[in-house]
Image (cartoon, grey):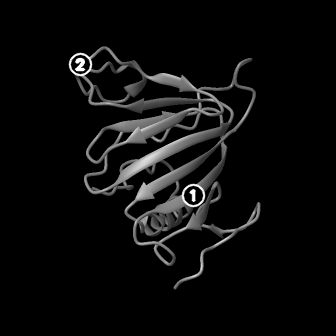
Amino acid sequence: MTDGLVMGPGEGQQVSPAMTLKVGDEHSQSRSMFEVADIAPGFDVGAHLHRDAEELFYVLEGQLDLLAFEPRFRTPGNWQSWESHTGATVARGGPGSMMYVPRGCPHAFANPGPGPAQPGPARMIFLVSPSGHEHYQQELAELVASTTGRSDRRAARPP
């Protein structure tokens, strides 16, 4: 029998300045779990999809704009204006909000601040299945740290 894992606040492996790995492929074959802190006002991950992974996002603090649907039209640049075939639009989620993203589903999140309703950074828990997403996050953090200027063309998202 294998022992479980208990971590206290602030523990885990730092994989990027804002992302701490809590559980990864070293401990689980089925999922990775991250705490994402200091999602600054104006941060936008951009719309993307993963063909071989599903994700769960749970907002702990602050507010995030959340998208998890196939839009009628994929317009470049402004995913915040997308609408699904059923009429769904981007949702603004505060503490306790959750977003589930099945494999192959376009998704995005952004911190809409600054403003009176969004005074600062957001914080969330992020789960990915299967495990191993931490390796992509580490490579992306290294790429961003070594890049000057625009990095969006150099950062390929995992399939």
Q: Position of residue 146 (x, y in %)?
A: 53, 64
Q: Amino acid at mark 2?
A: His
Which residue corresponds to mark 2? Answer: 85
Label 1 environment density (alpha carbons within 10 Å; few <14, some 14–19, many ≥20): many
What residue is at 62 percent from the left and 54 percent from the top? Answer: 35
What residue is at 65 percent from the left and 58 percent from the top? Answer: 17
What residue is at 55 percent from the left and 67 percent from the top? Answer: 23
Under tag 2, what secondary structure? loop
- Asked if 149 appears above or below 117 in the picture, the reply is below
What residue is at 23 percent from the left and 19 percent from the top? Answer: 85
Rendered image quadrant of residue 69: top left
Q: Position of residue 30 (x, y in %)?
A: 40, 66
Label 2 environment density (alpha carbons within 10 Å; few <14, some 14–19, many ≥20): few
Q: Could you tell whether 20 is left or right of 26 in the image?
A: right
Rendered image quadrant of residue 10: bottom right
Q: Residue furthest top?
A: 87
Which residue corresponds to mark 1? Answer: 34
Of callouts 2 and 1, which one flags the residue occurring earlier in the amino acid sequence?
A: 1
- Asked if 139 appears above or below 45 in the picture, the reply is below
Q: Could you tell whether 34 is left or right of 99 in the image?
A: right
